[in-house]
Image (cartoon, grey):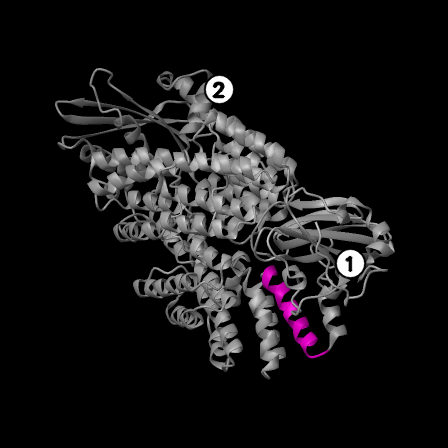
Amino acid sequence: MKRMNNIAIVATLLFLVSCTEQSDRKIRLSTRPIIALMQEEVETIQIAAAQKKKVALLDFQADPSAGEPAWLHEGLKQKLIRALAQSQQLNLGPSRFVSDALSTLGLSASDVANEHTSQRLAAELNADVLMRGHFRFDAQTLHVTVELRGRQDGQVLRQFSAQSSEPDTLDALNSVIAELSLVIRGELEDKQPSAPEKRMVYADVSTTSKEAYKYFIAGVERIDQFNMPDAVPLLVKAVEIDTTFATAYHHLAHALISLGYEERARPYLEKAVKYSQDLSFRERAPILAMQAILAGEFYTAVRLYNQVIELYPEDDGVHYELGNYYFSIAHDYEKAIEKYETTIELNPKHKMAYNQLAYAYAYIGELDHAFHILERYAELAPDEPNPFDSYGEILQREGQLKESIKKYEKALSISADFWPSRDHLAVAHQDLGQVRKAEKILQETLAGSTEKRFRATTLHRLGYNELLKGNLARAEEYIQRAVQEGPDDAGYKILLLYLNPESDEHRQYFREILGKAIDEFGRGGFNGNRLLHLASWALHFNVGIDLADDLLGKSIASSDDPISRRTALAFKLIYDLQSGRSTAEAEKLFVQVADPESYQYAGPAPWGQYWRHYFNALRIGNENGFAIRDWAAGLYDFANDANNPHFQINGTIAMAAAEHLAGNLDIAEQMVSKIGIPCEGNWKIIGPFDMQRGFHQQFWPEKKAVDRWIADEKYAPEIVARRDELFDGYVDLKQIAGTSMNQALYALLEINSKMFRTVQLRFGMNGRLKAWLNDELVMMKNVRGDALIDNYITTAKLRIGANYLLVRIDNVIGEMGFYFRLTNLDGAAVDEVQFCPPVLVAQSTHPMHNGS
């Protein structure tokens, strides 16, 4: 499974694992070519690593007869690593690298007690200094000794000892670590560091309770195993024992957000921020970054991570979390791949980096790379179900449903109660049209689940199963039960409104959601990312417009984050336009706040629904006499200054839309063609067709060669020329065809090329997609979500003359439509290509066909 699965979990995507183990190993990427950006980053990391003194901590050996607590051995090692990792001059080698090196040399930690073996191990690790320690209890006194050995001759450089008679074992541990880390840093660091840094020992500021520390260690182990339900009670116990345990609060918030409990996580995160003020920047940055992410302030979060990278560029955790940002928010999968590969080269056993890297490769169509990465992940975790679950999910996305089922069954053979695989298995059967099998799995899953979030999701799946059967009322009952299981999940309440938009009860649900969001502003806990969704849904359902307008005003007045404030202003402009109010004040504020370059951090995902409302506002503004050309030109200029491709494309479409509304149709067509978008009137529509047997049920347009059936008069009545009412680059099939539940439609475009060429076909869609070019299947995406321009890209070849692109979109309920761009391999429009309506088709006045 992906680390992030729903809107709530977006808040956790930049959770910075407390990684204090670094490596100076040369960065080696996968077999794909290294691009210039990646080479520059690798060189930066290598230079930074070379400038730091490389230290490897072997182990702490205990007196076997002393009967020390079992956790003390690991506690000594981890606390000393954390304390020394605050140094900007030392590069702490990961303990797993030490284990690998010892295994390669056929040694144990106890063997490294003489010059020869120490020298061999230091050379294998490329370490300047080796550390090893001993500890024992003697008459209630903790004695710890650490020796440092040099690389050149393996001899002991210095030996330091510390002791503590504190009655509490953890107090004693913290005391000796504080003393030892101070003298070790004094020995190893330059006497005059190039930049002053605050000396802060992690052990002094985490906890003073050994009981809390033990629960914390156990909880973190569960998080590393992706076992959030078991991690939560352990971490809750840790903060109950020590109510100022900042790091435990941080991890607890992470675990809760991963389970979808954003509201429950918020007070824990607030306490993490409160009690982390004495932590070093390296330890506090991830807490502040999570706070920024939860507030939707991505610019602030990314800035924090970049500051950490500047000081500690070899920290694999920071690169991993930035990869998550690029993957899940920015949708820049190439940059995500760079970050994940860097993470793996710094930390070859970072399992979740392999997991996320596989998804990133899959999202750019590199399935061979994705599956190769998952095989490496499975080698690292042969007894864990998640590698096989992720393999199955990627196969399922690509429409390989039977193959995906085999992977889910493999995952469940490893862990029969692994909930994600049970969930995905049921959905795969739904995609095949096997609703009875899916229902059986879901009912069994529901009966065996105690975790509320899992139960709510399973009830949601059962509701979807009823939609596949055409039973809307029964589906609504299941979603109502999901609301009861997960009362802080607004998503299910919005889904109820989607199922029955005329229901007074459901409309009141939505007004309550908006009211709650306004209250959150008063407590400083509102997520700016949610603002786009709520403001968009209010417009979509025409419910709570007044409350959403108030919410926008509060965000504009209170937000310090440039992206969050401009986001609120962008929607405020739409609200003003659609209500007939003057937009002057909103435009003035929009120009005043922040540099547009901050929008390079704004990903397209939250804006998926915004643009539909924007172009509708242009139409309404034009009808009301607004100067929409100036409005569109302002967006165009801003988008280019922002250096954000998503905004640049929509800025160009906005300029074309303004010309279209002014009656300059040829100019509008030329403008969108320059970015590879055909005018919507060039598409011909076939359908809708009633779906009963799943994603792979075939209908006649995909069974026959296109160039034959478009010239066959008997099919002419089935093919219509009709476009939706907005000029926005989006082919709104639902509006064109008036679709109902469980239907599929086809859209046909002729592409005339003067030469053979390789091109990219770029799609974004509401609904699942299949696309054929000249009768060859070139893309199949069994996914659902908001339509985003250029979200899915594939490479294809155009022949000389007419090329026929056939697109199929299907959906169970909701929006149906797609964006399409034709580009060269660099993402620019293709020269000497013309989009045409296919010949010998019916006129646009012909009625739509409704068949099966």
Residue 652 is a magenta residue? yes
Q: Nearer the viewer, mark 1 or mark 2?
A: 1
In the picture, residue 608 is in which quadrant?
bottom right
Which amino acid, by three-letter code, is at mark 1?
Ile
Say the numbered circle drawn on residue 104.
2
Q: Distance between the residues labelled 1 and 2?
A: 68 Å
Q: What element carries label 2?
A: helix
Residue displayed at 60% across by 84% down: 625
Q: Main secondary structure of the magenta part?
A: helix
Residue 666 coordinates in the image, percent (x, y): 77, 73
Q: Is 487 rendered above or below residue 134?
A: below
Give the number of callouts: 2
Q: Is mark 1 on a helix, strand or loop?
A: strand
Residue displayed at 24% across by 43% down: 239
Residue 339 coordinates in the image, percent (x, y): 53, 44
Residue 176 coordinates in the image, percent (x, y): 22, 33
Q: Is 567 rendered above or below residue 740?
A: below
Which amino acid, by three-letter code, is at mark 2?
Thr
Residue that carries the numbered disc 1 in the rendered image: 719
Position of 452 with respect to 71 (left or right) is right
Residue 628 coordinates in the image, percent (x, y): 61, 78
Q: Crowdedness of circle 2 by 10 Å Cα count: few (<14), some, many (20+)?
A: few
Residue 697 is a magenta residue? no
Viewer-proximal residue among 266 and 811:
811
In the picture, residue 846 is in which quadrant?
bottom right
User: Magenta residues?
Assistant: 645-663
Residue displayed at 53% across by 29% down: 409
Say the numbered circle drawn on residue 114.
none
User: In this orientation, does residue 787 appear?
Assistant: yes
User: In this orientation, does residue 319 appear?
Assistant: no
Q: Crowdedness of circle 1 by 10 Å Cα count: few (<14), some, many (20+)?
A: many
